[in-house]
Image (cartoon, rainbow, N blue to C red):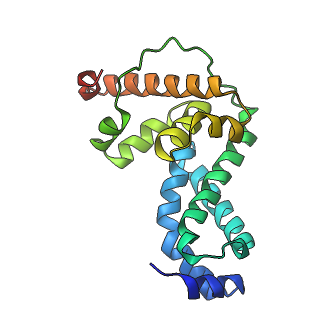
Amino acid sequence: MQYQHLLERCKKKDASAQRILYDLFKARLMGLCRRYAKSREDAKDMLQETFIKIFSKIEQVTDSAKLESWMKSVAVRTAIDHYHKSRKADQSLYTSTDYDIAGIDTEDILAHLSDEFLITIINELPSGCRMIFNLFEVEGYNHTEIAALLNITEGTSRSQLHHAKYLLKEKLNRTGIKRYEKLA
């Protein structure tokens, strides 16, 4: 979809254009924020902060074809900022690699579950695990990029991902979902 005219109007601080842009993307960005936030209320706060950043920095976007990916990037960076703010209060970074998750095809498992169920169980993960799981499995960042974004080591990123998968496997097991056993 071409957004050039809308982008130009938003750059001029046109309130009606900003409202249109907000309405076009609020659901997608809210879904992204929900994956990173501990609660729906936190996600709403994250979404509001994301749009404040979007409208204050929209002049950075020169190509309307890149607008949506830029907006998603702003939302991910906002989630990372929230993670850094809450990290001091929630020191739940795990460094153990004792979890055997080799061979689990996460994409296959996730494809067969409802979005709301996934958001619920992912939101139950400790913040470090949740952040890294989302960045790696959903957003496609690699461990080197995650380590740089979160100011951690690559080993911690890998360990957190392994622990997140282990915890998700346990949660799925407790709910009676055993499909992942076929993938191990």
Q: Residue at x 73, y 40 (%)?
A: 84
Q: Residue at x 51, y 22 (%)?
A: 163
In the displayed structure, 81 sits above or below 61; it is: above
Q: Residue at x 47, y 15 (%)?
A: 99
Residue 76: % across, % down? 61, 52
Residue 169: % across, % down? 38, 24
Residue 54: % across, % down? 67, 68
In the displayed structure, 62 sits above or below 49; it is: below
Report the label total.
0
The quadrant in which residue 141 appears is top right
The quadrant in which residue 13 appears is bottom right
Residue 102: % across, % down? 40, 20
In the displayed structure, 151 sits above or below 93; it is: below
Quarter in which the N terminus is drawn: bottom left
In the displayed structure, 99 sits above or below 25; it is: above
Quarter in which the C terminus is drawn: top left
Q: Residue at x 36, y 48 (%)?
A: 115
